[in-house]
Each structure stands twice: as structure tokens, then as C-alpha cells.
Image: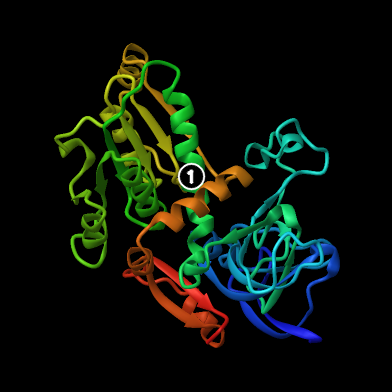
Amino acid sequence: MGSVRAVSVTAGVPNSLRLEDDHPEPATEEGAILVEALAVGICGTDHEIIAGEFGIAQPGTDSLVMGHESLGRVLEDPTGTLQPGDLVAGIVRHPDPVPCTNCAVGEWDMCRNGQYTEHGIKMLPGFARDRWRVQPRFAVGLDPALTDVGMLLEPTSVVAKAWDHIERIGHRAEWKPQTVLVTGAGPVGLLAALLASQRGLVVHVLDRATSGPKPELVAALGATYHAVPVNQLDIEPDIVIEATGAPRVVLDVMCKAAPTGIVCLAGVSSGGRTMDFDAGALNRALVLENNVVFGSVNANRRHWDLAAQALARADRAWLGSLITRRVPVSGYAEAYTPTSDDIKVVLDFTA
């Protein structure tokens, strides 16, 4: 073996993305399970890292190997947790070393001191390399039928956590939700709609796109697609999952939820924008209608397992339709250059 190809950046340096042909083999300290990479998914966090706005280098170097939406096949596992040939993804976040009260019980997605580490994002090498290693407790086995779409597990885990927390909050009282509004039809929004449809709920998805694959993907779930402002919708959703991060949309969905409604903010705003808004009216509505607004990000092992189950139940063709471009590693620069028609772009290590 000797060396691997790896897509990396110099952390904090804009436009330093590169393909290394002689990156060292993954160190055994990274984990006992050796994995051959099949693909990595690309998302907005990757674009922020490439722009130098985000990302922390691996200790002892100024570099960071990219890739946190992983999919691979087990080459060897001396622990017996998985078998050679098994399909596997690696959990992105690792608990902080203190550990805080949440990390100590496996809830690293709720880390209280911010000292967690993350593959391809913060201090841990990512999965965009020919081979990588993972510890058994951070290795998630996947249904063999997910070979072409298993890199969707990471964004699905984020959505599975959002649904887990929505349901926990909902059971504060008698709760029989019927209608869900998802704002944003990117990967997170569409996967949120998928999990809503799997729950038998009436699903509405709002996005700006009026052409392209998004309306058809929503319709294929049996959901209703909207391309109008939130305040023009003639629905009063029991649950809202906000996946755009657009400040206007964030504020509008808080006002749109039904009494005792739950609004989950899953999109991250860039900040720096101000607007006139009646905060008093919002406060009055939230209090008098017993509404809840909360933020959700990342996922722990329980959510990754729930996500794997959700993908195994989903229509494979529908999942495959989320992937709008598959690019070989040799075309890495093209893969990491977003286009307006993208939903999910995948860097293919098998091509």
C-alpha cells in the first residue's frame, strides 16, 4: 500500500484545495477498522473550509484532509465488529477529551465545552482519501443495497436527530401532529421530508426553485411543493423544519406554526443581516400558543443508527435522484465547485 490519494486543504488558507498523490496511509491510531473509500458527499461546510472560513488542521500540521460524508467498504477488522466487504460509514464527531457531561454518555452532538473533534472539519483527518480507519464505536454498518447512496447517511443522521428531538419535545403534552412544513429543498430539507413521509404525516416543502429536479423529488414522496413566500402559504403546520438558514424565512416560519407547534432550525445563517421585525408580536405568539423553537445540529450514534434504518426503508431510486453529480477523484476541483443545479455532489473513489 504505502500511500494514498487524499483531497486536502491548508486550514484557514482560501483556495488551497489540492489532491495529494502520496498522502501517508491512515495511522493505526485512527482505528482498528481499515476501510477502502467508495465515495464522499460534498456539502456547504466543505465550501466554507475551502474558502478558509472554517476548519481546523490536524495536530502537528497545517493541513486538513477533507470529507465528512463518508462511504466505504471494510478491508479488515481485527475486532470482529464488521466483516471484510461490509458497507460502512464513519461517524464524524468524536467526544471531547474532558469529557463534558454529554460527551461522557455518548451524546457528543450536545457537547457543552466545544472541545469535540470532527473528521474533515476539526482536527481529525477526513474521509476523502483512498483508505481510512475508524474505531468500532464510530463505524456504522449499512445495508448492502445502499452501495450507490450510502454517503447520504451523514446528512440523514442530522435529520434523524432533528426528528428525535422534535418527538421528545412534542410529548411534553398530548400530541397528534398531522402537518409538516420543510423550508429548503436541498439535501437536508429533502431528507427531512423523506423522514416525515415515513411517519405518515402530510408534508409540504417550500423552496425558491420552480424548475429542475426538486419539485419532482417532493412529489415522488407524496408531498406538496411550494415556491412562494412562507406568509403566502395556506397551511398551519404542527411541525416546521427550517433548512435554509435564510433570516427572513427563519422569522416567518416562527410565526407560521400552529398552536403548540414545534419549529426546528436546522439551517445555519451566515449573519451580518438586519431587518425590521416585530419581536414583541413574535414573543406574544410563542408564549400564548405554547410554541417551541429550537436549534439542532450534528448527531450521536443513536441517530446514525436511526438514519441507517431510514435509508434502508427508502426507495433507492429516489435516494439516487438526490445525487446530481458523481465526479471521479481526478476531477476533484470540479466536484468542489458548486453549480446552481446541484442537490448532492459526490466525489467517487471507484471511478
Q: Which quadrant is home to the N terminus? A: bottom right
Name the residue at 18% across, 33% down.
235
Q: Name the residue nearer the viewer: 221 or 213.
A: 221
Q: Which residue is mark 1?
A: 160
In the rendering, at what x and y percent does residue 97 appear? Answer: 82, 43
Residue 300: tell me if it is visible: no
339 left or right, relative to 119: left
Q: Amino acid at mark 1?
A: Ala
Q: Quadrant of residue 78?
A: bottom right
Name the residue at 21% across, 59% down.
215
Q: Quadrant of residue 129?
A: bottom right
* Residue at the top extreme, as displayed: 288
Q: Name the residue nearer the viewer: 133 or 43.
A: 133
Name the residue at 82% across, 61% down.
59
In the rendering, at what x and y percent does residue 344 appear? Answer: 42, 66
Rendered view: 59 above or below 330: above
